[in-house]
Amino acid sequence: MAKANHRVIMLADCQSFYASVEKSTHPEYIGKPLVVSGDPARRSGIILAACPLAKQYGIKTAERLGEALNKCPDLIVVRPHMEEYIRVSLHITEILQSFTDLVEPYSIDEQHLDVTGSLALFGSPEEIARQIQHQVRSETGIYVRVGISYCKIVSKMACDIFAKKNKEGIYVLPAENIARDLWPTPIREMFMVGSRMSRHLYNMGIHTIGDLAQTPLHKLKSRWGVNGEVLWRIARGMDTSPVTPGSFHQQQKGVGHQMTLPRDYASWDEIKVVMLELCEQVGSAAGIRGSWVMSLVYLAKEQIMTILQVSHGRREWMIPRILRMKCTKPLMYCFFVIGTACLFVELASP
Amino acid sequence: MSKKLQGNGIFESSRMMLPEHREAYIIHQEQLKHRTPPLIDPQAAEEMERIMASSMHGGFTISLTLFSEPEDIRLAGRVLRMDRQLRRIYWEASSADKYEWIELERIIDVEAPDEL
């Protein structure tokens, strides 16, 4: 791998990112179990991140705060500070960019790097990974795990399945070791396979990544179409996607806002106020005065789902779409935002 | 072919980024040093022109790399016409029914299929 006759791609993943940033900002919390959680009073008391010490108590991400406190009464609970997390994430991007200009964030705590052209300057892939770990830790206090391979997909799995579990926090998975190392892994651990998909695959007799890799492609395609082929390619480590730092310049396709209500709203008059507020926020975020922002509201038995869409003018295009949806979803209301003005239309009664 | 199976499709469709993070990242990237186009060796330029001419005459799909300051752009398609006087090519993109004139000075690399 050191001679780089093929690409050398890494995935750098920050351990318990939000919790680590909080511990780094508040050294008094070091050595204590800590979670980052929303406010239970506003019904957003979900664990967003737990430090490794908290995880030792069995606390899991997305768990309710109350349950977490039952498991560990001494738990330190901090509110999220998203601005700070974004600042630290960009600082890590800068550190990674000192090794290569090919850095692409995948999420706030995961970034891909293509270091193929940096080996002559910084040493072998493992040496570069160790330098990254050292520099990120010394400048931000965060521990980074690194998966190394020849493509983005395999580097991601090298990190998630192996580097996160070993002592060094680094794992190299070259193409020739995929069958030996990756294929015996349970299918639920594969990139892009969630719990529901793993159940479907289990029902088809596919229990490991290797089982999926050896399944005839047409079988997967006939069941899931292009997504079946995506899974098959992931299992076989087939990926030519480049590390593209500039892919974020693409135009944003959607604008949305959400809100957790402080209590259950039962009357439509109350819900209407919230919806109008959300529509105004979307209109403001879209920043397109004179264009139309359309919100469709479906009222199901126990939940409200809204779809907010932004359309650049051409209102005659929107009316048929609204009517078509009305036929399939009878419980629906529609809001329009034109510039800063809101208009509410009841399309069908609940 | 589906967009998911092309280029960076899998990662573009599954990336999880907060809008605020995306915005901050774009500003960060814009503040990075500006890039300049590479100097093309005359022999390399000749070879690139040969591949483009083969694409035009044989209808082969080739890959072009265009210089762009934030990041180079890769295109797949074929050359329909070469205008040597105005130093540009008429290009048909493979992914969509899209035709455009591309100036030769923007092209920094041309890749041919193995059979060429």
Image: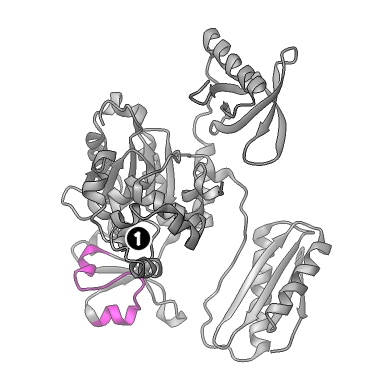
Residue at position x 61%, y 18% in the image: B54
Which residue is tagged 1?
A: A18
**Which structural element holds mark 1?**
helix
Residue at position x 69%, y 22% in the image: B89
* Nearer to us in this view, B40 or B37: B40
**Can residue A68 be seen by looking at this rendering?**
yes
Q: Position of residue A145 (x, y in %)?
A: 26, 49
Amino acid identity at mark 1: Tyr
Using residue A59 as the reference point, say whether residue A236 is left or right of it: right
Q: Position of residue A158 (x, y in %)?
A: 28, 48
For mark 1, name the chain.
A
Q: Which residues are magenta?
A: A51-70
- Rendered position, A9 above or below A256: above
Residue at position x 54%, y 56% in the image: B19
* Nearer to us in this view, B63 or A127: B63
* Nearer to us in this view, A268 or A318: A318
